[in-house]
Amino acid sequence: MNYILAINPGSTSTKVALWDSKKDLLMKTISHPEEEIQAFENIMAQYNYRINHIMDWLVHENISLDHISAVVGRGGLLRSIPGGTYIVSDQMLKDLRQGIQGEHASNLGAFLAKGIADIKGIPAYIVDPVSVDEFEKLSRISGLKEISRVSLLHALNIKATCHRLAKETSKRIEELNLVVGHLGGGISVAAIKNGKAIDVNNSIQMGPFSPERSGSLPVGDLVELCYLGKYSYKQMHSIVQGKGGLMSYLATKDAREIVNRINNGDKYAKLIFDAMAYQIGKEIGSYATVLSGKVDNIILTGGLAYSDYLINKIIEAVNFIAPVVVYPGEDEMDALIKGALRVINGLEKPKIYEDEVV
Ligand SMILES: Nc1ncnc2c1ncn2[C@@H]1O[C@H](COP(=O)(O)OP(=O)(O)O)[C@@H](O)[C@H]1O
Ligand SMILES: CCCC(=O)OP(=O)(O)O
């Protein structure tokens, strides 16, 4: 049996999947309790912890490394590069170790893939990392000379949903203009022009607030908050990235719990949840203008797309722009496997990171 192993490290879990030539996909979400993750100084320090969990899972599934022919990981905050499947290289690992564009759980994907692949001398890949950059020149201008807007997005799932829609409508992705909202713990809203993500909010720093991130904030007030002497640099980061958004207002990031509260008459929960829908709709409208209003479809995806309450509010606001297609959840594991397979089956040449940096 020849398996491909896919690894997707997230902030609270490591998702693993095994694909075999009979096209069976075996998947597992290995959850990491907060107190275990918190014990590590940084993301890189979690390497041994996460790889041990993956090895234990393989043993549990009775899969020998001898039967794995390639390993593919989610790509992290690398330098800006075009979409595609990349061979894990030393330079890539160096940039991730250095945190060239910041810290993110996905920075471990290439390390975990390479770590396992090297035991047997098999190839290690990453696919459509979060630093996929297909921006047009205009998209990079921020409003302050010292700061450029950068392309960071849920590229893997966004690209996968574009391919899915193209297939379902018998079109080529290059023919489609789409606005895609990946609505998860973080939110990316991207303008996809002829298959390329020509602009996106950058879910870590801007755009609508999300279950755990503040999104764009009034900039002067943010500067004030930073200099109050109340919070350290590290605390400020964790406030806007992990404890912002729904978490900040409602002390939970669980959309199901919030809808329950709303159904039980909690007016404040309704105000905040409705505001998130409002901001998402506003962002979608803004990205429709990037495409001059020529939008074939709006796609809503990610965990929050399971919430009928939220999705109906967003659809109400944006369906004057284009028909809305909802793909709840995410298909990142499948996208990783498919990316590796395109290269293994010779349909695509694997990209070399060093040659592609934008
Ligand atoms: N079945 C569901 N119904 C409503 N909301 C859901 C459902 N599943 C997940 N969510 C919400 O989606 C959000 C997380 O999305 P997800 O894509 O799983 O996040 P991530 O992968 O970024 O951690 C959370 O707010 C969670 O409560
Ligand atoms: C860096 C953009 C991708 C992102 O925010 O991923 P998560 O939601 O998985 O943290």
Image: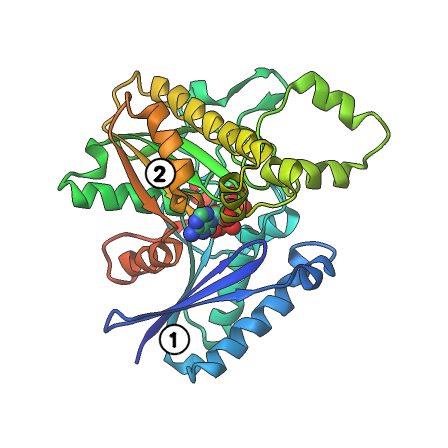
**Which three-letter amino acid code belongs to the residue tagged 1?**
Ile
Q: Quadrant of residue 143?
A: top right
Q: Which residue is mark 2?
A: 300
Task: Look at 53% across and 52% down and name the residue there.
Answer: 106
- The residue shown at (37%, 57%) is 336
Whole-percent x and y of residue 58?
Answer: 47, 78
Can residue 99 be seen in the rendering of this structure?
Answer: yes
User: What amino acid is labelled 2 in the image?
Assistant: Leu
Q: Residue furthest right?
A: 229
- Secondary structure under tag 2 reads strand
Q: Is residue 206 above or below residue 96?
A: above
Q: Of 240 and 151, which appears nearest the observer?
A: 240
Q: Residue at x 38, y 41 (%)?
A: 308
Does label 1 point to a residue whose CB lies under 8 Å from ligand 2? no
Vertical placement of 223 versus 169: above or below? above
Q: Residue furthest front?
A: 265
**Which residue bears the numbered disc 1?**
68
| Picture coordinates of residue 287, whole percent (x, y) | 39, 23
Which tag, 2 or 1, sits closer to the chain's start?
A: 1
In front: mark 2 or mark 1? 2
* Image-based side of 42 in relation to 118, left or right: right
Residue 343 falls left or right of residue 77: left
User: Quarter holding the N terminus?
Assistant: bottom left
- Say left or right for 49 vs 194: right
